[in-house]
């Protein structure tokens, strides 16, 4: 709870500062802060205690800052807390996951942005020997078709970081992995945008040194303004994700349904965030790390 309060305070402070900066700088600078609630159902077909459900809460925010001629920096952060029973997570509890990201994008032309990003995330557990830190470096592009669709894609390399305090740690999380993310946003409705997203990842090691990881996710989501040209939106969606430690037969299938609210600034429609460079980060590397203890 203290971690949640600290994260809320930090994100709120950042967003207030960003909103003021948007007013003082340029109307093209956009951002949002959001709070999303989820219901999740997970199953490991090979585990006796392999079925459980959870509620979750996610607090996130992002800000796109334009500078020079056609340059954009995007800052983002997220916090997620789950309530899964410890039995499905290898006998220990998931603790809140954190992730921060920094993107640089360059306008190639009036419709295409391209650039790269860095991110750092942490998936801790009640046993510190099962804490996992994940870093990503990748390239990305966003294309506005100008025909009611915005397309985006990311390709990244990631690795887990050893915790020097965890001398007994033998698992790896998302170790020496790659992830591909691609999505499309339909913008043809007056107040609503609909998104479809696909993600595939693979790591050299996952739960153990000789257990490669394979990860998959597909999500369908929407975001609707609560009033015409209003700052408040409601976001909703469903996601299916699969996390697999290939050589030992353990896997997790997780289905999620989400509902939340966002306050956006500097944008007249939710898709303006994506057009400005705010498309988020890959989902599977950090989430796979959160599920690592179940793969033993």
Image (cartoon, grey):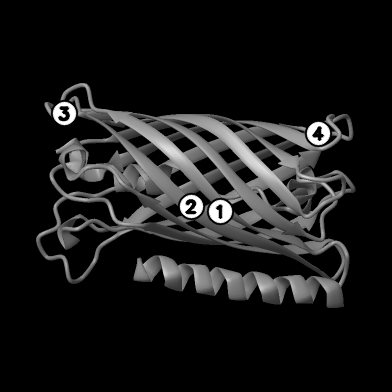
- Nearer-N-terminus badge (3/4): 4
Q: Residue at x 15, y 40 (%)?
A: 87
Residue 248 marker: 3
Q: Are marks 3 and 1 in contact (CB under 8 Å)?
A: no
Using the numbered discs, state the Cα–Cα distance from disc 3 to disc 1 in whole angstroms: 37 Å
- Nearer-N-terminus badge (4/1): 1
Name the mark nearer the viewer: 3 or 1: 1
Q: Are marks 2 and 1 in contact (CB under 8 Å)?
A: yes
The quadrant in which residue 253 appears is top left
Percent coordinates x, y for residue 14 in the rendering = 62, 73
Mark 2 Cα within 10 Å, few/some/many (few <14, many 20+)?
Answer: many
Secondary structure type for disc 4: loop
Using the numbered discs, state the Cα–Cα distance from disc 4 to disc 2 in whole angstroms: 25 Å
Mark 3 Cα within 10 Å, few/some/many (few <14, many 20+)?
Answer: some
Name the mark nearer the viewer: 3 or 4: 4
Give the residue number, with chain letter if any, for mark 2: 58
Name the mark nearer the viewer: 4 or 1: 1
């Amino acid at each position: 709870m203290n971690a949640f309060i600290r994260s809320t305070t930090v994100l709120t402070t950042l967003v207030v500062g960003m909103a003021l900066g948007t007013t003082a700088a340029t109307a093209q600078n956009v951002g949002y802060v959001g709070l999303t609630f989820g219901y999740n159902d997970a199953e490991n077909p090979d585990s006796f205690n392999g079925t459980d459900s959870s509620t979750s809460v996610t607090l996130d925010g992002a800000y796109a800052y334009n500078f020079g001629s056609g340059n954009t920096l995007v800052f983002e952060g997220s916090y997620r807390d789950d309530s899964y029973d410890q039995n499905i997570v290898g006998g220990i509890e998931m603790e809140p996951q954190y992730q921060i990201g920094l993107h640089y994008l360059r306008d190639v032309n009036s419709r295409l942005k391209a650039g790269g990003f860095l991110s750092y995330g942490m998936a801790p557990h009640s046993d510190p020997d099962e804490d996992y830190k994940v870093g990503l470096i990748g390239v990305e592009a966003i294309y506005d078709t100008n025909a009611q669709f915005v397309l985006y894609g990311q390709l990244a390399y990631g690795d887990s970081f050893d915790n020097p305090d965890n001398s007994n740690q033998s698992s790896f999380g998302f170790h020496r992995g790659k992830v591909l993310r691609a999505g499309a946003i339909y913008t043809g409705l007056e107040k609503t945008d609909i998104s479809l997203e696909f993600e595939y990842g693979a790591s050299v090691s996952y739960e153990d040194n000789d257990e490669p990881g394979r990860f998959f996710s597909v999500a369908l989501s929407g975001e609707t303004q609560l009033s015409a040209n209003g700052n408040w939106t409601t976001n909703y969606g469903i996601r299916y994700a699969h996390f697999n430690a290939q050589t030992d037969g353990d896997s997790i299938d997780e289905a999620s349904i989400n509902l939340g609210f966002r306050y956006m600034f500097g944008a007249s429609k939710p898709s303006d965030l994506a057009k400005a460079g705010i498309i988020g980060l890959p989902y599977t590397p950090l989430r796979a790390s959160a599920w690592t203890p179940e793969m033993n």
